[in-house]
Amino acid sequence: MGYANDKIIGKIKKAEELINEIESKIKISKNCLITLGCYSECWDEDNKTETVKLIEYFLKKGNQIQLSTKKRIYIEEIIQLKNLIKYLGQFVIFVSSASVSEAERIEKNTTIPEERFKTFEISKELNIPTVLYIKPVLKGITIKDIEIYKTVIRKYNIKDVVIGSIFEEEGTSEKIHFSDNKDLFYNPNTDEIKIIKELSKMKNVKVYRRSSEVMKFYEL
């Protein structure tokens, strides 16, 4: 997005401030899909409390919400949301992973994959859909972990998997969703096609190209 980490760290708005801006300036309707965590980590220790408040606000309004994270979400952190959810898929969690074997190098300062994947326990315990979000697919890196991803899918009985392209400035036929930035595009690679083909062979697993397709599937 053109920002350096040292320029945005610590600049956290309170949920109340954001909600006030929404109600006074933006007027988001309940038909609007709310996307949290697509361009930044919304489940860090210093901001997840505000994230939960935003989720509660939009659930009460009737919006559909997707949350993407590279952190582990514990059941006790969101159990209070269960009674606010009006239908299956109003709130969907995407557990993001671009690599398992090289996560320490590729995804620094995130929850290690083994712990992060325990977030999938939420699906069974709270009946909140949790999606394996293999994004972005990194050429020559992500594909090495296909068998590991298969094991994770079987272990947690994962039903929905998204194989996502990397965002780059190189122009393609498809601009990225959920952003006003007109200079970023989806840039798929051949590894992506191979991973999709392989995981699509798994029983009772739906494989998608975009997270928006999952939300559309669960839309009321």
Image (cartoon, helix red, strand yellow):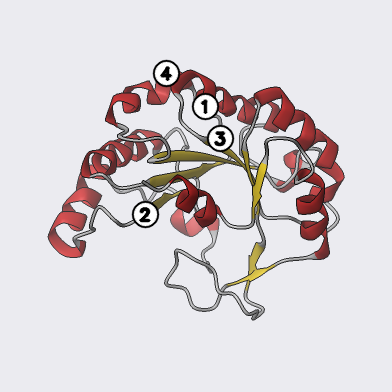
Q: Nearer the viewer, mark 4 or mark 3?
A: 4
Q: Nearer the viewer, mark 1 or mark 3?
A: 1
- CA gap between label 2 and label 4 equals 25 Å
Residue at 79% in and 49% down: 142
For residue 163, say whether it is visible. Answer: yes
- CA gap between label 2 and label 1 equals 21 Å
Q: Which residue is denoted by mark 4 in the rendering?
A: 76
Q: Nearer the viewer, mark 2 or mark 4?
A: 2
Q: Name which of mark 2 and mark 1 comes first in the sequence.
A: 2
At label 1, which amino acid type do we have? Ser
Q: Name which of mark 1 and mark 3 comes first in the sequence.
A: 3
Give residue 56's quadrant in the image. Answer: top left
**Residue in front for this viewpoint, 49 or 159:** 159
At label 4, which amino acid type do we have? Glu
Task: State if disc 4 and disc 2 touch (CB < 8 Å).
Answer: no
Task: State if disc 2 and disc 3 touch (CB < 8 Å).
Answer: no
* Residue 107 x %, y %: 68, 44
Q: Is residue 170 left or right of residue 88?
A: right
Q: Which residue is denoted by mark 1 in the rendering?
A: 123
